[in-house]
Image: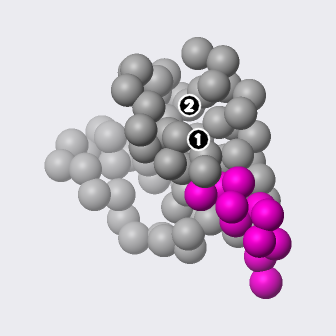
C-alpha cells in the first residue's frame, strides 16, 4: 500500500504542474510524463498525433522502466520541488 503522505504530496505536485502556466523545458516534461505514467500504472501508448512526440515519450518511459510506483511518485515530487518550483 502506498503511504498516504506520499500520495498526498504526489497529488499536490501533479496539481501544481497542471496549473502551471509558463512553458517548461521539454526534457523536464518528458521526465514528469514518465514518472506520472509509472506512478499511475498507465502503460498505454502515448496519445500524441505527432509521431516524433510519441517517440520521445516512449523513450522517456523506457528510460524510467525499472522504477516502481512509489519511487516514480517520489521522483515526480522531487522533480517538481527541485526544478519546476525554481523556474
- Whether 24 is among the magenta residues is no
Quarter residue 68 falls in: bottom right
- Image coordinates of residue 53 in percent, x first then y, are 32, 40
Q: Quadrant of residue 19?
A: top left
Q: Main secondary structure of the magenta part?
A: helix
The numbered disc on residue 28 is 2
Give the residue at x 67% y 47%.
76
Res. 58 in view:
yes
Residue sitting at 56 percent across and 73 percent down? 41
Task: Name above or below for residue 32 compared with residue 45.
Answer: above
From this view, report whether residue 39 is shown above or below residue 26: below
On-image quarter of the C terminus: top right
Could you tell me if the residues under marks 2 and 1 are in contact, i.e. CB atoms within 8 Å? yes
Q: Residue at x 46, y 52 (%)?
A: 58
- The percent position of residue 17, horizontal first and vertical second, equals 50, 39
Mark 1 is surrounded, within 10 Å at the Cα level, by few (under 14), some (14 to 19) or many (20 or more) other residues, namely: many
Q: Secondary structure at mark 1?
A: helix
Q: Is residue 82 left or right of residue 23?
A: right
Real-space Cα separation, disc 2 to disc 1, in angstroms = 5 Å
The quadrant the N terminus occupies is: bottom right
Residue corresponding to mark 1? 31
Give the residues drawn in magenta, as a range.
Answer: 1-11
Q: Residue furthest top?
A: 87
In the depicted view, which residue is nearer to us: 55 or 80? 80
Estimate the x, y position of residue 54 in percent, counting from the top left.
34, 48
Residue 80's x, y, as percent?
65, 36
Which residue extends farthest left? 49
In this rendering, the answer to whether 29 lies above or below 24 is below
Whether residue 65 is visible here, answered yes or no, is no
- 74 up-or-down from 2: above or below: above
Amino acid at each position: 500500500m502506498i503511504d498516504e503522505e506520499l500520495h498526498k504530496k504526489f497529488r499536490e505536485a501533479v496539481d501544481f504542474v497542471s496549473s502551471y502556466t509558463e512553458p517548461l523545458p521539454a526534457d523536464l516534461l518528458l521526465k514528469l510524463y514518465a514518472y506520472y505514467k509509472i506512478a499511475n500504472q498507465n502503460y498505454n501508448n502515448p496519445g500524441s498525433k505527432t509521431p516524433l512526440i510519441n517517440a520521445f515519450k516512449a523513450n522517456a518511459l523506457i528510460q524510467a522502466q525499472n522504477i516502481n510506483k512509489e519511487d516514480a511518485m517520489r521522483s515526480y515530487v522531487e522533480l517538481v520541488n527541485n526544478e519546476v518550483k525554481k523556474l
